[in-house]
Image: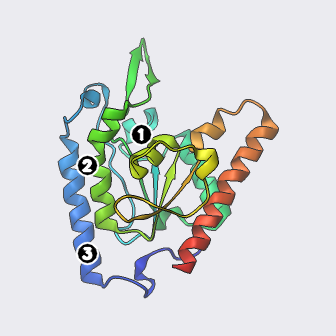
Amino acid sequence: MRLLRCGDGSGRDVNAVRSSAASLATLAQEAKSCTRCPLYRNATQTVFGEGPADAKLMVVGEQPGDQEDIAGRPFVGPAGRVLDRALAEAGIDRTQVYVTNAVKHFKNEPRGKRRLHRKPTRSEVEVCKVWLLQEVAVVRPALVLAMGVTAAEALAGRPMTISRERGRALVFPDGQRGMVTVHPSSILRVPDEAARHQAYAGLVKDLKVALKTLQAV
Ligand code: URA
């Protein structure tokens, strides 16, 4: 595992990092009562990003799932386990990464005892971007890795085809250096085992490219 914090001597001083951590805590507190779109109505709570305020790498998913909604933390369910394994295999320590989502509430449709995952609309993503862009502005990571099309389009501000754009250096409209890859849940949905392994290997490969990019910054 390699150190992926600006505190490794290449970045901000300790007071700047403390001030960023305080800003993130304030943002997380404000986001708790967010009612900018209707998604808060069916969700247990806002799931804000988490991780070091001086992380060099930020990873962004779509929205919290059922388990994240209950735990109040991003990527702690099945997709999170795929992500954790892939990060570890790529040589990246998750505790050094800022992990968040494009949308901070779990969009779902209650069906009896179950809650069915629903994709956020473009306008819900747009409205929620106010939180994501502030997270990026505070953490100022060397690289933002968008996982899946919702995060990629939110950050790039344009239609994205993951298969075409994955694994290469991009610059988002706010000047942020970025990269896109598949969403970990897409791997879980691949029915064929060999194809699933291949999809997983693709995620690990992209994470390794992200790490190499960070090491070159
Ligand atoms: N999927 C996401 O996009 N984010 C999470 O936090 C969990 C699952």
Query: Circle 2 — which element?
Result: helix
The type of residue carrying mark 1 is Gln
- Asked whether the residues under the numbered discs 3 and 2 touch, taking CB atoms below 8 Å apart as contact, a structural biologist would say no
The tag on residue 130 is 2
Query: Circle 1 — which element?
Result: loop
- Which residue corresponds to mark 3? 18
The image shows residue 127 at horizontal and vertical percentages of 26, 40
- Where 206 sits versus 189, above or below? below
The type of residue carrying mark 2 is Val
- Which residue corresponds to mark 1? 63
Q: Nearer the viewer, residue 168 or 107?
A: 168
The image shows residue 15 at horizontal and vertical percentages of 24, 81
- Where 15 sits versus 136, above or below? below
Real-space Cα separation, disc 3 to disc 1, in angstroms: 27 Å
Between circles 2 and 1, the one closer to the viewer is 2
Q: Farthest residue toward the top?
A: 112
Residue drawn at x 27%, y 57% as measured from the top left: 134
